[in-house]
Amino acid sequence: MEEDNSTRYPALNEITDNPFHLLENYSNDSSMLTLASGFLSDEQFYIIHLIIIYTSQLINICAIIANSLSVAVFVKLGFSEPSNISLTALAICDFTLAMLLTWSNLCFWLTYHNVPLPFHGANVSFLTGGDHWAFLSSTVAWITAFISFERCLCILFPLKVRRLITPRGTFVAMLIIILLTFCPSFFMYIRYKFVWEFNPYQNVTILNTIPVNSEFVILFEKIYLVIYGVIQPLLAFLIVLICTVLLVVQLRKISFWRLSVTSAKRQRVQPEEYPAGSSSASGARISPKEESLVRKVVAIAIIFIVSYTPICIMIICYVALDEYNAFGVYRRLFVVSAYITSLGQPISGSVNILIYYKMASKFRSVFRRLVRLDRQEQERHELK
């Protein structure tokens, strides 16, 4: 006899407006319903979902460890350099992202295995984890945009910008970005509220969330999601992309300038391509320290672009397709793609520490002392 999925997945199917609900369809379009039925069965949905969750948890652990070490190193380095402040803010946000994803994954895993919880795993974790993760992703995007834009200005207008980019100014900029991008995530508590409901499967009262369906709140949510869920992340991504292209072009000019100087046998002549006093010439003659920092920022930005592109594609699909959301015909595809795209940023956060270690000698030195690599190498050398 064929197994009834409603008994196999009772914890997820108990509330019909649950984004993980599998048995009901909310579309009135029969043609779309027929098309969507062949996408993912219940079995395929959960197998893919669980594989992604296990993979995500492993990546999240790596991101938590990596960003914890990055913050510890930057604290030891101090914050006299503005770049250390912005990179520390980036590491803290990446750490928090990984923690939120870990919480959401854990709640879903426990719900899937029918572990009794004092709250509704999927709904509560969405409001306390997934929602904040989405907004914090935008915060990471804007911090990366700020870092890239600041490096562009430092190369194009070095004499003017260095007076403006100070540790205090960078700290204030980080606070403003967090206030404008992450703090609005708490507005979702206007749209949803916590309630105590009786759960017949556990025979206990558990904490759950329900939507507030007043016309004003629904209109507020639509405007709110367009601004903070669509416009804001896409604009940040565009700024990072443009600034990264400008930085790469400038690095190529720097390499050409160095090659011209070498071919001129170290004579003190101004390459013809860069007239004296031009911004290109001043940019080409940046110090090796500045050039190393630019290369580090370019590497961070490229990794961010690669990891954030799937999120931007998902946002565009969410806007373009009416049924591509947590409650539409394509909700299974939406949930799976959301989990897959969420893997990008923990990976990015885990890889950043390798960039710092490879491209920053001070970071590498403090990191090695922090994890006692230098002492271990010295002890091995003494034993030999």
Image (cartoon, helix red, strand yellow):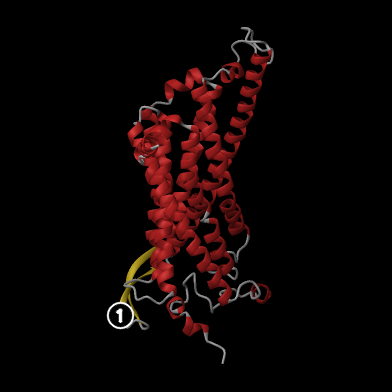
Q: Is residue 266 above or below residue 294?
A: above
What is the quadrant of the N terminus in the image?
A: bottom right
Q: Where is residue 121 shown, x and y percent of the image?
A: 39, 69
Residue at 35 percent of width and 31 percent of height:
79
What is the quadrant of the C terminus in the image?
A: top left
> In this orientation, does residue 82 appear?
yes
> In this orientation, does residue 211 appear?
no
Judge the density around disc 1: few (<14), some (14-19), many (≥20) Cα neighbours within 10 Å.
few
Q: Secondary structure at mark 1?
A: strand
Q: Where is residue 290 shown, x and y percent of the image?
A: 50, 24
Q: How many marks?
A: 1
Q: Nearer the viewer, residue 113 or 378?
A: 378
Residue at 63 percent of width and 23 percent of height:
255
Q: Nearer the viewer, residue 203 or 90?
A: 90
User: Which amino acid type is shown beneath numbered disc 1?
Assistant: Val
The residue sitting at the top extreme is: 268
Residue at 50 percent of width and 35 percent of height:
358
Q: Where is residue 333 shown, x and y percent of the image?
A: 59, 66
Q: Is residue 226 above or below residue 152?
A: below
Q: Is residue 146 above or below residue 119?
A: above
Determine which quarter of the picture holds residue 80: top left
Where is mark 1, residue-wise?
A: 204
Q: Where is residue 209 shown, x and y percent of the image?
A: 38, 68
Determine which quarter of the picture holds residue 295: top right
Q: Is residue 205 left or right of residue 3?
A: left
The residue sitting at the bottom extreme is: 1
